[in-house]
Image: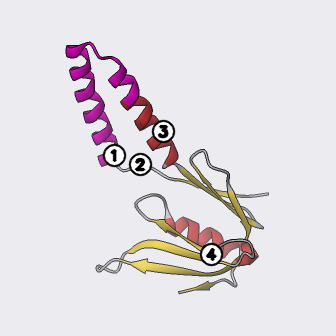
C-alpha cells in the first residue's frame, strides 16, 4: 500500500531565536552560577519545537494528522468534502483549508500553511486517491 507522508519544517527564524535565547541565558547563568536557567529554557524550547512538529500521512483510504505528542487525528478520505486553496496577493498558493464531515467533531476543518510543508504535494496526494473531492 503506497502512502504519502509530509513532515513540517521549522522556519529559520525560530531556530535563530532559540539559539540566541539559549546562548544569552547560558552566559547569564554561568556568570551568576544559576544553572537551573539553562535547564529550564532548554526544556521549554525542546517541548515547544517538538509540539509544533506535524506529520501528514495520506493513504488510499485515510488522512492522518499527527501533531507533536498528541493523539493522531485520523479520518477517511471519503469524509473530505472540499479543499479550499488560499492565495497571496501575488497569486501564489499560501495554504490549504481542508473541510471534512465527522459526526463527533465540533470543528470540521483545518488549515495547512505553505511555510510549514509542501501544500501542493498534499493537494496532489488527496486528488490522486480521491479525485471527486471539490477543490475551490
Mark 1 neighbour density, 10 Å: few (under 14) some (14–19) many (20 or more):
few
Vertical order, 41 against 88 (above or below) = above
Asked which secondary structure carries label 1, the reply is helix
Q: Which mark is residue 129?
A: none
The earlier-in-sequence mark between 4 and 3 is: 3
The earlier-in-sequence mark between 4 and 1 is: 1
Asked which secondary structure carries label 3, the reply is helix
Check if mark 3's residue and mark 2's residue have beta carbons within 8 Å: no
Residue in view at x 78 percent, y 67 percent? 61
- Specify the principal SS of the magenta part: helix
The residue mark sitting in front, 4 or 1, is 4
Q: Which mark is residue 47?
A: 3
Q: Which mark is residue 108?
A: 4
Residue 94 placed where, x, y %?
Answer: 40, 71
Check if mark 2's residue and mark 1's residue have beta carbons within 8 Å: yes
Check if mark 4's residue and mark 3's residue have beta carbons within 8 Å: no
The residue to which callout 2 is attached is 10
Distance, label 4 to label 1, CA atoms, is: 29 Å
Tell me the quadrant of the picture where the N terminus can be found: bottom right
Residue in view at x 74 percent, y 58 percent? 2
Q: In this image, 12 relative to 46: left or right?
A: left
The earlier-in-sequence mark between 3 and 2 is: 2
Distance, label 3 to label 2, CA atoms, is: 14 Å
Amino acid at each position: 500500500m503506497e502512502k504519502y507522508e509530509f513532515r513540517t519544517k521549522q522556519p529559520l527564524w525560530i531556530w535563530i531565536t532559540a539559539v540566541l535565547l539559549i546562548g544569552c541565558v547560558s552566559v547569564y547563568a554561568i556568570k551568576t552560577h544559576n544553572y537551573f536557567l539553562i535547564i529550564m529554557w532548554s526544556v521549554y524550547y525542546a517541548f515547544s519545537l517538538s509540539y509544533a512538529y506535524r506529520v501528514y500521512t495520506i493513504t488510499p483510504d485515510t488522512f492522518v494528522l499527527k501533531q507533536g505528542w498528541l493523539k493522531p487525528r485520523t479520518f477517511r478520505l471519503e469524509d473530505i468534502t472540499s479543499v479550499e486553496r488560499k492565495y497571496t496577493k501575488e497569486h501564489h498558493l499560501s495554504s490549504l483549508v481542508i473541510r471534512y464531515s465527522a459526526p463527533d467533531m465540533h470543528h470540521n476543518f483545518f488549515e495547512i500553511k505553505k511555510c510549514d510543508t509542501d501544500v501542493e504535494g498534499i493537494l496532489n496526494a488527496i486528488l490522486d486517491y480521491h479525485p471527486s473531492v471539490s477543490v475551490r
